[in-house]
Structures are given as C-alpha cells and as structure tokens.
Amino acid sequence: MDAASGVILTLVGLIIVVWSLGLWLTSVAKTQLETQVTLSPARTVDIIEQCFSGLLWKDAPGPGAINKRRRSLSDKTAVISIEIAPLPNGGSHVAVWMSAWQSKYGIANDSGVIGMKKKIIRRLEAA
C-alpha cells in the first residue's frame, strides 16, 4: 500500500468514527430523563426556569409544559420539552426530553440538549 492509499483509508476511517460518534450522541440526546422530587410543581418550574436563564435559550412551541430552544441564526436547533406532574404526596414527577430536532445523515442538531437535560435533573435533585 502506498502513502496515498494509507491517507485515504485513514480519512475514511476517521469519517466513520466521527459519524458513529454523532449517531451515539443523537441517541443520548433523544433519551428521556425522568425524576421524582419532593418539590411542589410551582417550585419545580422556578428551578427549571433558572436553568434556562440568560440569552442562550428561548421559548419554543412544543408538547411539554415548558419548551425551550437554543438561540441560533437558523432557528433549526432542537427543542427541549419538560413535563411536570404533581404527585399525591405533594412532590413532582419531571420528564425531560428532546421533542423536536432536525437531522442530517441521521445525526441530530442537538446543540446543548444533552448537557441541559442533565443540568435540569441535577439541579432538581439537589434542591
């Protein structure tokens, strides 16, 4: 095998690795996270809204009680939806998922969804 073939084979292998990583991250982003907390639904909403404070996220249409999209020039980023249900003991059941996205070659444009979903669950469980 000559040097040109080695370079081409390396590039093809790198493309496959990057594409596979993108598919895996898309799968992680699409996974719904759930938790139950002892907080009232109103306090739960307050904590969730604090997670989205700042200029990076804006309200978006979606199926959840709270739906947010990361700001971008194209407005084609993923939507995080959050559903909050009261529990009989006074707590709240919270579900967080990516409800809308656009994908290219099977890879979703999830910009920040994975980290934000984990941040919301972490902050709720710590409160």
Image: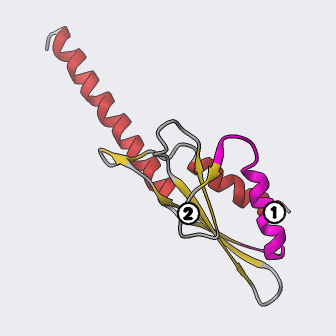
Instruction: Point out the stretch of residues depicted in magenta.
Output: 36-57
- Residue linked to disc 1: 46
Q: Do the residues labelled 1 and 2 touch (CB within 8 Å)?
A: no
User: Mark 1 falls on what kind of element?
Assistant: helix
Q: Which dot, 1 or 2, sits closer to the camera?
A: 1
Judge from the rendering whether residue 58 lies leftward or rightward of residue 32; answer left or right.
right
Identified at 39% across, 50% down, the residue is 102
Q: Is residue 78 visible?
A: yes
SS at mark 2 in the image:
strand
Measuring from the top left, give residue 90's x and y in whole percent.
Answer: 83, 84
Extreme-top residue of the structure: 3
State which quarter of the image contains the C terminus: bottom right
Q: In which quarter of the image is residue 54?
A: top right
In the rendered image, residue 106, in percent from the top left (x then y), is placed at 32, 49
Q: Quadrant of residue 64?
A: bottom right
Report the amino acid beneath label 1. Asp
Q: Mark 2 points at which residue?
A: 97
Q: Residue at image x 64%, y 50%?
A: 58
For residue 86, the mark is: none
* Quadrant in the picture for residue 38: bottom right
Residue drawn 28% across and 23% down? 11
**The N terminus lies in quadrant:** top left
Q: In this view, does 38 lie above or below 54?
A: below
* Image position, residue 80 (x, y; %): 57, 58
**How would you rate the neighbour count of disc 1 (Cα within 10 Å): few for under 14, some for 14-19, many for 20 or more?**
few
